[in-house]
Image (spheres, rainbow, N blue to C red):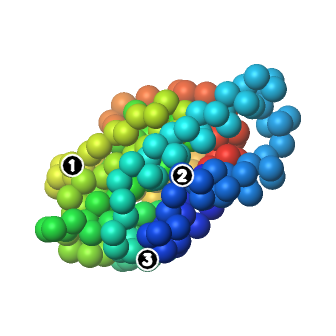
Amino acid sequence: MVNQVVSRYYKLPPKSQTPKKVMELIDDHWSAIDVRQFESKVHYYRALANITDHLLQFLTSKKIEYPPLFLYEKFNTNIEELGTELSLTIEVAEWTSNSFIIKKYLVDTHEDMNLLFNNMISVFCKKAFGQLPERIEIFSLMEGKIETYIPTMKDVSDGLEYLNIIKNLLQEPKKYLKTDSLTVCKSCSYQKRCYEGSNINQERFISH
């Protein structure tokens, strides 16, 4: 739902990018969300109120003068260090005077996942475009917060490390599950996220 609203809004001509239009787009897509996906009706309406309020705030607070550089475009690039290809969808990218910024709109955010997204974007942009984004902005629609990251080569290195672990896990799952999992977890920058609950289906449902 969020991705659809954001995509349709950015495709509008500037004169049509108004708070009223955001409300109309939310109304178009929210009706497809089943109230049973939520803990209660109170939770359902609270989520609707928060998402509506913060989408209005984030989308209309600054006038969009130029079309985005990328809008929900999927790219592929070869990662030579890993001998594999990486596919990634860039939701929103906008020009700056010197480079570009990446924007991601989420129902809710988690620190570990934000850092992982920052690292993955850093790897991808460096390999695919030859440069890092000027900054990465992650918008939390439930909390109304913006997390901003300034990518560095350290983020590229951390991202490559994570991708290498995932590649090895996929190639030799029995090895990691039976013998090396503890060693791998201790050396992995993202181990904390592994121990968190998996109750994020609702967030993914709303985001689409």
Q: Which residue is mark 1?
A: 150
Q: Amino acid at mark 2?
A: Pro
* Nearer to us: label 1 or label 3: 1
Q: Amino acid at mark 1?
A: Ile
- What residue is rendered at 31% in x and 52% in y? 136
Residue 19 shows which numbered tag?
2
Q: Nearer the viewer, residue 92 or 191?
A: 92
Residue 87 can be seen, yes or no: no
Disc nearer the start of the sequence (2/3): 2
Instruction: Classify mark 2: helix, strand or loop.
Output: helix
Tell me which corner region of the image, top left, top right, bottom left or bottom right, holds residue 35: top right
Q: Which residue is mark 3?
A: 76
Callout 2–callout 3 Cβ contact below 8 Å: no
- What residue is rendered at 17% in x and 55% in y? 153
Callout 2–callout 1 Cβ contact below 8 Å: no
C-alpha separation, residue under disc 1 versus residue under disc 3: 23 Å
Q: Amino acid at mark 3?
A: Asn
Q: Residue furthest left?
A: 98
- What residue is rendered at 58% in x and 48% in y? 174
Disc nearer the start of the sequence (1/3): 3
**Residue 41 x %, y %:** 81, 26
Q: Nearer the viewer, residue 16 or 51?
A: 16
Q: Is residue 39 above or below residue 107?
A: above
Residue 57 can be seen, yes or no: yes
Q: Within 10 Å of the Cα at label 1, are there few (<14), some (14-19), or many (20+) other Cα atoms?
A: some
Instruction: Classify mark 3: helix, strand or loop.
Output: strand
